[in-house]
Image (cartoon, rainbow, N blue to C red):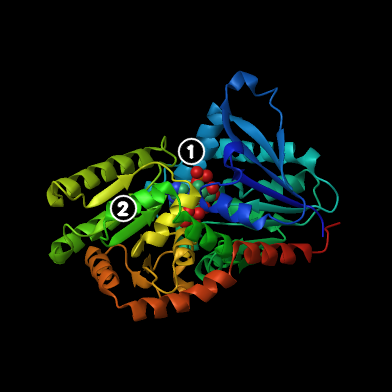
Amino acid sequence: MGRLVVVSNRVPAARDRQQPAGGLAVALRDALSEGQCLWFGWSGQQIPEEDKAEREVSIDKVDNVTYATIDLTHSEFDGFYQKYSNGILWPLCHYRAGLMSYTRADREVYLDVNQLFAEKLLPLLQPGDLIWIHDYHLFPLGQALRDLGVTSPIGFFLHIPFPPWSLMKALPGAERLMRNMHAYDVIGLQTEDDARNMNDGFSVCGVEARAQVFPIGIDPESFAEQARDGLEHAEVLRLQESLRGKPFIIGVDRLDYSKGLPERFKGYEAFLKRYPEHKGKVVYLQITPVSRGQVEEYRLLKEELDEAAGRINGMYGDFDWTPIRYLTKPVPRELLAGFYRLADAALVTPLRDGMNLVAKEYVAAQDGKDPGVLILSHFAGAAPEMEDALLVNPHDADEIADALHKALTMAQSERCDRWNRLQPDVWRVTAGSWARDFIGMLAAKVKRA
Ligand code: ADP
Ligand code: F6P
C-alpha cells in the first residue's frame, strides 16, 4: 500500500504532537501509528499579508509522521476559518441555520484557501499516495487537486453531522459543494443519519457519489492504561482528596454551542432543586477550554456560561460547598483520564455532535468492577452505539436531573451490567479500526487515468 497523506485544517501544534486536543487530532494521532504518513494542514500561525508571497511549507518529522504545515494570513484565517468554516458551515451542519452568517466574500476566501492547500500540497505528493482529506474546512479540496491533475485515490471524511438537504440547501452554493464531492473516491461520515442526508443531497443534485458510514473511535487500550496510571498523578490525587468521598460528576467539552452546556447547567440546577438530598454532597467538575474564542457566538456563549456557573454557585452553594467547579483551560490527557476514572457519572449532552469521543473515553477509563455511569444525549453520533448509557434529551432539564439522580443512586450491579454492555463496542470500533476500514476502502480504488 502507498504512503498515506492526511490533510486537515487542524494539525497538532509541535508541542502537542504527542497529546493533541480536539476529536479529529486525537483520533488521527491514534490512527496514524503505522506506516509512513504525511500530515498536511494549517500551522496554527497567522502572518501579515505582506509575508504571504514568501510563505513556505514547514516540515517536521516525529516518528513515522512527517508534518507539513503552512501559515495563513490574518485575513485568510478570518475568512476561511472563523467566518466561513466556523460561522457558516459549522452551525449549518449542526442544524443551527439561524446562527449562520453568510457573505459571498467569505466564501471566496474559503475557496481561495482550499486552492492554496491544493497548490502547496501538490509538490509534496508522490506516485502511489493515498490522499485522505478531513472535515468541513476542506470540502472542495479534492476537486481543486483533481483540477491540478492529481490522479491518486482521494478520500474525504466528515467529522461533524451532515444535515438533511432541506436544511443544507440554505447554504448559497450548496449544489456546487455537492457536485465537487464527485472528486472523491470514498466519502465517509459518522452515522447512518448523516450518510443518508448526504446521499439524499447527491440524488437531488444529480451527483454520482455515495457516502458511507465509518464510525470513529478512540484507542481504548492506551486510554484505559492512562486512566489507571492517572490515579498516581499528584493532581488526580489532589482532586480525589478534595472530593472527600463525595459523589463526583464530570463534563469535558470544548466551549462550543453544539455541546449543550447552558442546557446542561439548567439540568444540573433542576437536579439540585428536585433532589435536594444531593445538595452539599455532590461535586460537578466541568472542564471546558475556550475554543474559537474570537467567533462572536463562542464569545457570547462563554459569557453566558460564566454567568450561569456564577449564578448557580451563588444561589445553591454554601461556605463549605461549591456546586459547580468550572474550568475554561485544557487539561493534559493523562490527568483527564484519571479524572474520568474518579467520576461516578459523566455528562455528555450535546445538542448535536458528529460522534463525541469523550463518551467513549469515559467508558474506557472506568474500572469495570465499580464503573461510573455515562449520561449521553440522543443527539451525539455515539448514541446509537451506546444505548446502555442513560440516554437523555438535552433540551429537557428535568430529564437530565432524573438521569443524574438515577446515576448517583444506581446499584453497583446495574452499573456493571451497563458498562459490560458498553465496553465491547468501545474496544471494537477504535481509531485504528476506523482508519484501517477507510484506508482499506480507498486503497481498493483503481487509479484514475
Ligand atoms: P470535538 O471534536 O467536537 O472537540 P470530541 O468529543 O469528539 O469533540 O473530541 C474532543 C477531544 O478533545 C477528546 O479526545 C477530549 O478528551 C479532548 N478534550 C476535550 N476537552 C478537553 C480538555 N478540557 N482538555 C483536554 N482535552 C480535551
Ligand atoms: O471534530 C470537529 C472539529 O471541528 C475538528 O475538525 C477540529 O479539529 C475540532 O473539532 C476542534 O476545533 P478547532 O480545530 O476549530 O479548534
* Nearer to me, 378 or 313: 313
Q: Horizontal and vertical percent for residue 77?
A: 54, 33
With 17 as the anchor, is 377 left or right in this view? left
Instruction: Report the front residue among 270 and 113.
Output: 270
Q: Is residue 93 at all visible to an observer of this figure?
A: no
Which marked residue is nearer to the observer: mark 1 or mark 2?
Answer: 2
Q: Answer few, some or many: residues within 10 Å of disc 1's Cα (few below 14, many 20 plus, some between 14 and 19).
A: many
The answer to whether residue 418 is left or right of residue 445 is left
Residue 82: which numbered mark, if any? 1
Q: Quadrant of the C terminus?
A: bottom right
Which residue carries the number 2 mark? 241
Image location (x, y in percent) of residue 112: 63, 36
The three-letter code of the residue at mark 2 reads Glu
Please name the residue shown 57% across and 60% down the image: 222
Circle 1 SS class = helix
Q: Residue at x 54, y 28 (%)?
A: 75
